[in-house]
Amino acid sequence: MKIALLASNPDLYSNQRLIEAGEERGHDMTFLNMRYCYMRIDATNPEVHYRGGTNISEFDAVLTRIKPSMTFYGCALTRQFESMNIATINSSTAIAQSRDKLYSLQLLLKSGIDIPTTGFANSPMDTSDLIDMVGGAPLVVKLLEGAQGRGVFLAETRKAGESVINAFKSLHANLLVQEFVKEAEGKDLRCFVIDGKVVASIERKAAPGEFRANLHQGGSASVVKITPEEKRLAIKAAKTLGLSVAGVDIIRSSKGPLLLEVNSSPGLEGVESATGKDIAGMIITSVEKRLGWRRELGPNPDIVYE
């Protein structure tokens, strides 16, 4: 098969591993820097062109790994490939839903998934009431556009919470405030879901003096055995947002597992290093299954691509 990886940085571990895994399985892999892609919007002959004017319309599938700052254009490109009847993993709709932190939480709550108590506002006037909504201090303040632990702040006192929220007022920023789950002790679970199955799980632990467990913020990872309830939560969260491949972040609280976030472009380095599993290979296998590919026989001529 001809498989493209739509991303921004070819040197990232996750991107290199996906290219390697596809080539090891005999596929023709191409890295597409989304900044070099542009589109011909046409009802009968939609196209995507690449830097230099090359028409790149012959792929069987496109793996989407879109960084947060490129969400709008990355989703537009993904929709264009979909209009050309090229399979995308993940889909444009799923990516867009997962990247909108507020909307994704609303969808997850509607499906019955528990999350930490959350407040949302745009440059709020009633700062004190917003803090009371989530049970007071300590509390977590998040910018909607943040990723990898960036744009996330812990306010240990009410005064600190007011200061952080008031600082965002001058930016006219959309922000979330969430209750701080102390009993999580700076740990969370990253469950890697592929096609409705949890294929790997790790526990991430925050670095000393840090409350964010993200590996990009210096956290460490180790293998963890998750409970059946945690597994069901992770699978349901990915399904609710329509993600074929997802990193689902969960914390353990006195009320049971709570969902923190669902990532549509989860990093592979931490989970592969901790578990020794070939997650990149599993993602390529997912593409093969979706397109009815048999490694010995080639593509199934009877398959109907969606």
Image (cartoon, rainbow, N blue to C red):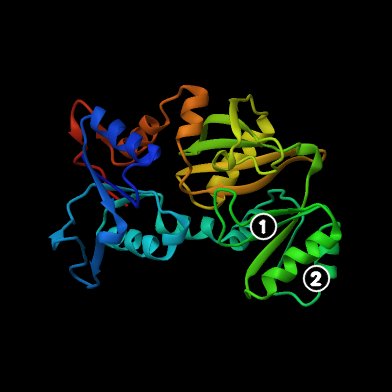
Q: Distance between the residues labelled 2 and 1?
A: 26 Å
Residue labelled with disc 2: 127
Taking the spot 55% from the left edge, 48% from the top edge, the residue there is: 148
For residue 217, which quarter of the picture? top right
Are there few (<14), some (14-19), or many (20+) residues within 10 Å of tag 1? few
Say which of 100 and 159 sits in front: 159
Q: For mark 1, what is the residue?
A: 110
Q: In this view, does 236 lie above or below 197?
A: below
The part of the image, by quadrant, that contains residue 183 is: top right
Task: Identify the mark at residue 11; answer none if there is no mark.
Answer: none
Q: Is residue 212 visible?
A: yes
Tags 2 and 1 in contact by the CB under 8 Å rule?
A: no
Q: Check disc 2 and report its element: helix, strand or loop.
A: helix
Image-based side of 40 in relation to 75, left or right: left
Identify the mark nearer the N-term, 2 or 1. 1
Q: In which quarter of the image is residue 175?
A: bottom right
Q: Residue furthest top?
A: 276
Name the residue type under label 1: Lys
